[in-house]
Image (spheres, rainbow, N blue to C red):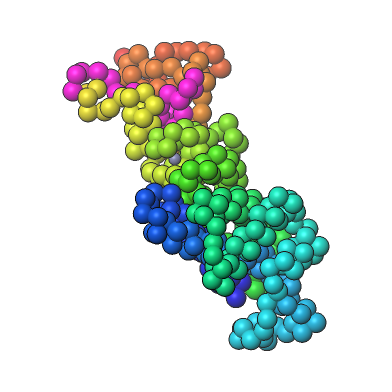
Amino acid sequence: MNSTLLENGLDFILLATKFLKESEENIDEEEKSRNIKYSLINLLSGVELVMKARLYAENWAYIFADIDKARKSLLSCGEFNTVDCSRCIDRLENLCEVKISDADKKAFDNLRKKRNCVEHYIPMDSCADLSSTINQALTATVHFLDSTFSVFSSPDIIDLSDDEFRTLSEKEKNLYSDITVAISSLNEHYNIAKSIATKRACEQGSCLEEDLVLCPNCNERTLVINDEDNSCHCYLCNYKSNGEDAAKDYLYSVYNINEYETVKYGGDYPLYNCPECGENSFIQVDNNYMCFSCRQNYCKNEIGFCEECGRPYIILEGKDIKMCPDCYDYIMEKIEKA
Ligand SMILES: [Zn+2]
Ligand SMILES: [Zn+2]
Ligand SMILES: [Zn+2]
């Protein structure tokens, strides 16, 4: 029950952003107004479902219209009335300590009024008016999704006595990030998508904002290196790549350095083996050197380049022997044998 609620809710919201995007691109007025209508209906259904999922996460009984008539046995067959939208918001605030700003409440309310027009065949406003209603409600929805994400995913509210409780499924996590990507492509929502992506990158990638790196695909500082699955992952555009390829993409997009061209004209391609993990994904990032595989980060003056083999090494406590450990060992061995 819980999983269907949240998953379906997120799915509808994703669909709503796609229809809104289509309406932005469509020049045919009739098509445009259809896209807007579908966007509106899906957005409202979606956000209502996510709100119910949030109530459910607090207490399954809260989604019953009449809490006195709540029975766990009814949940599985679905034969009961669920709480309506305005009371849903009241319960979120009063019972779950969710804060929804007055502006956001008004945006949801306007969305509901417009949906009623659609459903009762009342002539609708012009498309521009409708899309501004949807845009405001979408902003409110993003605020709400942002506040729910940590509640759904954070293990600190897990009640071990409740065997139904679980954290976000892979599918739901993907839906959250697909929604961020989708809204970032909408005219009015790029900035909010960017700030949500930054926040989520820090949370999920367990890093600080200053550890985030410029994404070679979308050029925003929303790339997590060595994310959960050891890949580099951008939380804004969903770019994913292994450390070596991401480092190459970075060199190309930030410094305009192309491996093929560089090597062809006899230059040195500035991609190195990491002195920490050995992967071929160590490059200069701003004034530092950074490994795109293990996330190890060094100031420029902490790294030297071996005079024997050219590979980078860590300068130990300011004592620079101008050599990497391998070359140093090799030379010492030769001296000992001699
Ligand atoms: Zn990106
Ligand atoms: Zn490394
Ligand atoms: Zn060396």
Quarter residue 211 falls in: top right
Q: Outermost residue, left direction? A: 264
Residues in magenta, as a range: 264-291
- Residue closest to the far front: 123
Frontmost residue, 124 versus 217: 124
Does any portion of residue 206 appear in the rendered image?
no
Residue 93 position, x and y percent, is 77, 60
Query: How many labels sit on residues?
Result: 0
Eyeballing the image, is 39 above or below 296? below
Is 286 contained in the magenta span? yes
Q: Where, by quadrant of the figure, is residue 79 drawn?
A: bottom right
Nearer to me, 271 or 66: 66
Q: Residue at x 74, y 57 (%)?
A: 98
**In percent of the image, x 37 and y 17: which residue is there?**
306
Asked if the magenta segment contains residue 80, the reply would be: no
Residue drawn 68% across the image and 81% down it: 81
Left/right of residue 330 with respect to residue 292 in the rendered view: left
Q: Where is the N terminus found, in terms of image quarters?
A: bottom right
Residue 29 appears in the picture as rendered: yes
The one of 253 and 47 positioned closer to us in this rendering: 47
Classify residue 7 by image quadrant: bottom right
Q: Position of residue 97 (x, y in %)?
A: 78, 58
| Closest to the observer, 269 or 132 | 132
Vertical position of residue 265 compared to residue 165: above or below = above
Q: Quadrant of the C terminus?
A: top left
> At x 46% / y 51%, what residue is drawn?
182
